[in-house]
């Protein structure tokens, strides 16, 4: 896809959202079913069924997906798609690219072993390895705009309003 095709594909949406900002407000949803036989949750991904379970560092077998890994995978996916879209829009040629995310966890927090240990990632690092002939200033712009428009990155960096409820 080239920049013109991307613009043409997105133009009707942009115009619609300018005319009717409420049309741009979409609620994304995810759903999973608690497994009744083991410590796992079956998540409908839209393409397949993913089964999430305990990480081996918390007693899991490693047979199921770790939700922490899934979070990093979502970040990589979103950042990669965003980077490619921005590169296409700015006509920055990419010969090849890798997107990597890694995060540091202290499982003492998750297991309730140490009250001073946080539950969740202490740090997350996102990195891009690109093969491109574009000048440094264009690549700097590409990185800046990718960071700015990546939904998952921005959600992690600017904590959204959260709520939890239980229905029994």
Image (cartoon, helix red, strand yellow):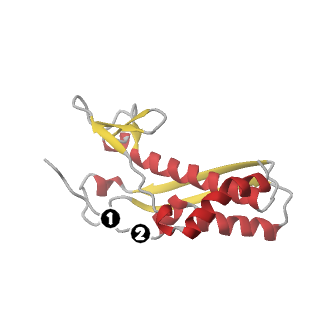
Is residue 39 shown left or right of residue 52? left
State the CA–CA distance, disc 2 to disc 1: 8 Å
Q: Position of residue 110 (x, y in %)?
A: 30, 54
Structural crowding at the residue carrying mark 2, measured as other residues with C-alpha within 10 Å and reported as few (<14), some (14–19) or many (≥20): few
Q: Tell which of 71 and 107 is nearer to you.
A: 71
Structural crowding at the residue carrying mark 1, measured as other residues with C-alpha within 10 Å and reported as few (<14), some (14–19) or many (≥20): few
Question: Label 2 belongs to which residue?
Answer: 159
Q: Which of the 4 image quarters holds residue 116?
A: bottom left
Q: Position of residue 106 (x, y in %)?
A: 37, 56
Q: Residue at x 64, y 58 (%)?
A: 12
Q: Position of residue 163 (x, y in %)?
A: 28, 63
Q: Residue at x 79, y 67 (%)?
A: 138
Is residue 122 shown left or right of residue 128? left
Q: Residue at x 51, y 50 (%)?
A: 74
- Secondary structure type for disc 2: loop
- Secondary structure type for disc 1: loop
Q: Tell which of 27 and 119 is nearer to you.
A: 27
Q: Position of residue 39 (x, y in %)?
A: 26, 36
Which disc number belongs to residue 43? Answer: none
Is residue 156 shown left or right of residue 101? left
Which disc number belongs to residue 162? Answer: 1
Cβ–Cβ under 8 Å for marks 2 and 1: yes
């Amino acid at each position: 896809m080239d920049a013109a095709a991307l613009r043409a594909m997105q133009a009707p949406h942009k115009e619609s959202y300018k005319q009717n900002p409420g049309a741009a407000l979409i609620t994304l949803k995810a759903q999973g079913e608690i497994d009744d036989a083991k410590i796992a949750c079956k998540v409908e991904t839209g393409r397949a069924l993913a089964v999430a379970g305990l990480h081996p560092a918390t007693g899991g077998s490693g047979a199921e997906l770790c939700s922490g890994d899934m979070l990093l995978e979502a970040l990589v996916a979103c950042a990669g798609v965003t980077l490619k879209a921005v590169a296409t829009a700015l006509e920055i040629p990419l010969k090849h690219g890798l997107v990597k995310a890694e995060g540091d966890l202290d499982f003492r927090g998750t297991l309730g072993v140490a009250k001073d240990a946080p539950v969740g990632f202490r740090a997350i690092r996102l990195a891009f390895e690109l093969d491109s002939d574009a000048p440094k200033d264009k690549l700097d712009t590409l990185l800046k705009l990718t960071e700015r428009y990546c939904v998952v990155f921005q959600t992690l960096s600017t904590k959204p309003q959260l709520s939890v409820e239980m229905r029994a």
